[in-house]
Image (cartoon, helix red, strand yellow):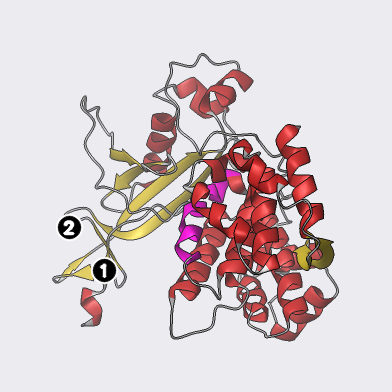
Amino acid sequence: MPKSEIHARPWCPFCSQIISKPREPDIRKIGEFSTGSCTNCGAVYTCDPTGFNVGAAMVDCLVHACNDNWELAWDLLPEIDYLTDQIDKYDEITNQVVDVGNLDGRAVRGVLFFVRMLGDFTKIAEKHGQPNSGFMIGPISGPSIAIEIEPARDPKRIKKKADKAVVQAMVESLDIDGLVDLALDDLKTIRFIQRLLFTPDTAIRWKTAFIFGKVCARLSTRKPGAVSDVLHRLFAACSDSASTNWGAIEAIGSIISERPDIFGTFTRYLFNYLGDRADLPATLWALGAIAKSRPDLIRKTPFYGLLDFLNDDDSLIRGLTLRIFGHVQAKEAKQTIKNLQNDNAILTIYEEGKPVSTTIAELATEAIRLIEH
């Protein structure tokens, strides 16, 4: 394919869902842009077809996300109440993103600007003392996780360049603070961490996946788009049959479990890997990690298809499945879980990057405790 023809349908930068073409509002106002919303995560977007009015498009998008409540829009704080992102080189005529910025001899400069609320719109409006007209835009509702916004770095600082050897040393020493600092200066830090996942050494792989999740969680408070790109790359690695995906699924689970408020909508894609026996343990672990921080995200998926794994011949598969059902408080599986309380098979599950030795009986007892809690 000629380079000038490389193009793709537009997608939501927060959840990767393909989005529809922005539409003109029913009642058009002067200077108003065409808008749309992601059907998956609720992000709102506006289109500036020229690329010269991005500031105005940003304001219009935020106001639209607030149901045209200008006063509330000006009260909201970026990265505390909402996140923003954008996609460049968008062609409104053909509804395509053109990588090279040229299509059929004409320049493509359009911009799609996105706003996604961090939590329930009703609660955000109430926090700022504004009336809510019933319009809600934001991520899947569920229990919130206290997120501390990463402090802004001194803009006059001398930015550091990421180096593979330095990043590896930081990972080995669990220097999460240093990795976050370096990632904010140079996003190549994230790529270097990702490369460390691809090792046959199980201990190093799990340790790296844990650190990856912690670093991406903090980075996402300042650069959520960069972390979204990481998830896209990890999922691509999992889907590429010609390459190894060591550590990719574990890293996906670690990242989503740390920031389910932003990336929880990626959870459903993990179910695609349950049919591959080689990927099954990592996939079940990832679902269990997400279930621990946001059980509602798992309950909204077809998780009952996991019931058969409670009777699997592999004790690791049984144990990882017990971990999921305990966190989601699956009362429907209670009797099957009770039957495993006499199973003394020994297994090792990694928690926070460290191996934890346990038994099926212990995991079943803990699952019952969580279900009856």
Front residue of this view, candidates 184 and 54: 184
- Whether residue 320 is visible to the viewer of this picture, yes or no, is yes
**Stretch of the chain drawn in magenta:** 261-274
Q: Amino acid at mark 1?
A: His
Label 2 secondary element = loop
Q: Residue at x 40, y 44 (%)?
A: 40
What number of labels is visible?
A: 2
Q: Which residue is mark 2?
A: 94
Residue 266 shown in magenta = yes
Tell me where residue 121 appears, x and y as whole percent: 52, 27
Tell me where residue 368 appears, x and y as whole percent: 74, 41
Q: Bin the neighbour count of mark 2 within 10 Å (Cα to Cα): few under 14, some 14-19, many 20 and up.
A: few
Vertical arrangement, residue 92 with respect to residue 358, above or below: above
Q: CA distance from mark 1 to mark 2?
A: 10 Å
Residue 355, by quadrant, is bottom right
Q: Amino acid at mark 2?
A: Thr
Quarter occupied by the C terminus: top right
Q: Which mark is residue 181?
A: none
* Residues at discs 1 and 2 in contact (Cβ within 8 Å): yes
Quarter occupied by the N terminus: bottom left
Front residue of this view, candidates 142 and 334: 334
Q: Which residue is mark 1?
A: 7
Residue 5, by quadrant, is bottom left
Vertical arrangement, residue 74 with respect to residue 246, above or below: above
